[in-house]
Image (spheres, helix red, strand yellow):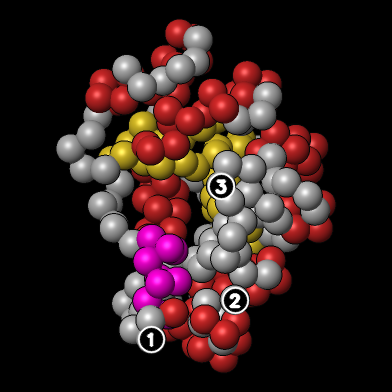
Amino acid sequence: MQDVIGILGGTFNPVHNGHLIMAQDALECFGLSRVLFIPCCAPPHKAADGLAPAEDRLAMVARAIEEDERFSASRMEMDRGGISYAIDTVGVLRDQYPDSRICFIIGADTLPELHTWKNIEKLLGLCEFVTLARPGVSAGDLADHLQLPGGAAKQLLKRVAVGHQVDISSSDIRRRVEDGRSIRYLVPRSVERYIQSSALYRKEHR
């Protein structure tokens, strides 16, 4: 059976239960063999204000997935440094795993932004994008928002599945930590302990 690698990239600032559920949904919906979590060094599409150090973000991901053999973490974007572009990451993985299928996991809210990604047409030729939509959202609902050539849009819309609706955000978690409120049940217990012991996201840590 062919190895199918799912890529889940992001700042993971911090990683939370929504990320883990998304990875599991993608694995089950698209027949992935495993999911590779790749914390970015510097995000290309958002401000880096309040971004925890890369080593801390990787450490939290490692703790969050340590008991699930289907998931692994990679420091490749951190080691490469600079702005983390998907085209560079997928290119390296394509060389490392020439016989594997590579699937880039995104949420439906990212689909309308794909045309802004660096070398997106080349990227679409190197990997498959698999999209998880909220319950009640279909591929047809997303079609009007794609700003890509017709052939590319059709291929993207063929790989849309409905995942769980989990309204957890890293920004809300950071605000809760800063305000001294609990983040239990929003992140794995190991991540909560790491944030506490490292004093991440507190006002005095900023």
Q: Residue 71 at x, y = what percent?
A: 55, 61
Query: In the figure, is residue 153 to the left or right of 41?
Result: left
Q: Amino acid at mark 3?
A: Lys
Q: Residues within 10 Å of mark 1 (few under 14, many from 20)?
A: few
Question: Which element type, helix, strand or loop, lies under badge 3?
Answer: loop
Residue topped by disc 3:
46
Q: Residues within 10 Å of mark 2 (few under 14, many from 20)?
A: few
Quadrant the N terminus occupies: top right
Q: Quadrant of residue 38?
A: bottom right
Q: Tell me which residue sits at (24%, 29%) in the image.
A: 138
Residue at the disc numbered 2: 206
Q: Quadrant of the C terminus?
A: bottom right
| Mark 3, other Cα within 10 Å: few <14 / some 14–19 / many ≥20 | few
Quick one: label 2 or label 3, which is nearer the N terminus?
A: 3
Q: Nearer the viewer, mark 2 or mark 1?
A: 2
Magenta stretch, residue numbers: 169-177
How far is disc 2 from disc 1 in space, using C-alphas?
15 Å
Amino acid under disc 1: Gly
Q: CA distance from mark 1 to mark 3?
A: 26 Å
Q: Gap between marks 2 and 3, in whole Å?
A: 18 Å
